[in-house]
Image: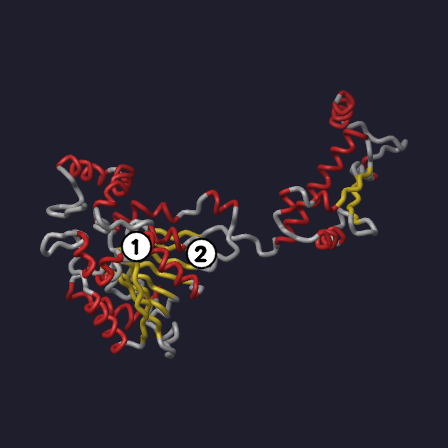
Amino acid sequence: MFVIKQDPRFKDAEDEDEYQAGRKNPILRDIKTCRLKGQQEVESSDSVKFEPPLYIQRYAAVVEHCKRGQFRNVADFGTAELTFVQYLKNLDFVNQIFAVDIDRGLLNCHKHRCKPLMFNHLNKRAEPLNISVLCGSVLEFDSRLHDLDCICAIELIEHLQAEDVNAFSDNLFGSLKPKHAVITTPNSDFNVLFEFEPGQMRHWDHKFEWTRDEFLAYCDGVQSQYDYTYTLFGVGDPPLENISVGHCSQGAIFTRLAIKLASSTETNTSHLYEVISSVDYPVADKSHTPDFHLTNELIYTCRRLGMDQYHLEGDEISVISIAHLQTFPSVDQYRVSDEHIAGLARACSELEVMEDGMSIVVCNVPNSPEPSESDLSDDGLGEVNIDDVVWEAAEEQW
């Protein structure tokens, strides 16, 4: 069981010394942050364990909402180590992600997590994606985040001072006005299962933790003051014998009512957030459709089979059945019919389809280029090219 008494980040003085050293060494700090992550927030006990871990269940619940709404631009408030961004960037319909946090050092330490991987260069996205890491306060308005499809505040609001909650709500719902907003926060009714000491909270930095009734009152206040409706949800099911305490984490999905917003020219341009990092992901050429790639694959495979036949049997022409081509994984991956392949081959000047439409004819011997007049001498003999002589000799020896 986790018990938080003094500084929960460190188990002993040695841990604190390592942390102070890590502040000067980003690599050490990154490793240390990962190791301390499980010690910072209590979300399990001897009697209550979540599988998968509760933070993953929270992220999955918010991602599912993003999938249902097909949100193209999303902001993550309180992004910290940019963990939730790793989920968002894998959604192929998302074009813009804003990751916002007030801790500049933490963002600089983890901004590398937003960079495209080798996989992203080899498997380029069909749609563009930009990830911008911004340093700023969620209490301040930044026009770049105005009228987004969704703003997520996952386990953030309880880190604010109680007197700042109204300012946060006014900025989020009154100024930024996203089409949707998702807020999650601990359910303090659940804390009885953690065997806490009196007044203890799940995290050393939590300023408060709401009961279900208190969170409901907050949501009602947002609905009455701003043009939003809401739907409640929960993450982390309680044990059957303690079902009355509710979910471990409580959340609400706020949806903006159909109202006319000010145009971008009427909205004050205010870029208060500092750009820590901005990365564009590789995008595939839209002219390179699956049929384009399949046609190139057919040309390559047919030529390779034809050259193999030429070197083994000396055949200058090969007839390759389309059914045989379908046995190659590079062709089969496209999951198209033989008729579709025949149609692509007919449209390609480098391939010829038999009349029955079931085979492709391949010329195994490439055509020799015709010599130009400048390559011929007056007596009709071509000039000797030493490169050609060396190549002929090498070819004969082989």
Instruction: Identify the residue at image location x=26%, y=51%.
Output: 104
Q: CA distance from mark 2 to mark 1?
A: 17 Å
Residue type for callout 1: Thr
Could you tell whether 283 is left or right of 244 in the image? right
- The reply to whether residue 136 is in sight is no
Residue 294, x across and y down, in percent: 65, 49
Residue 259 is tagged as none
Quadrant of image for the N terminus: top left
Instruction: Identify the residue at image location x=34%, y=53%.
Output: 84
Could you classify mark 1 by the number of other residues whose Cα lies within 10 Å: few (under 14), some (14-19), or many (20 or more)?
many
The residue mark sitting in front, 2 or 1, is 2
SS class, disc 1: loop
SS class, disc 2: loop
Q: Which residue is mark 1?
A: 79
Residue 15, x across and y down, in percent: 17, 37
Q: Which residue is mark 2?
A: 91
Write down the quadrant of residue 222 in the picture: bottom left
Quadrant of image for the C terminus: top right
Could you classify mark 2 by the number of other residues whose Cα lies within 10 Å: few (under 14), some (14-19), or many (20 or more)?
some
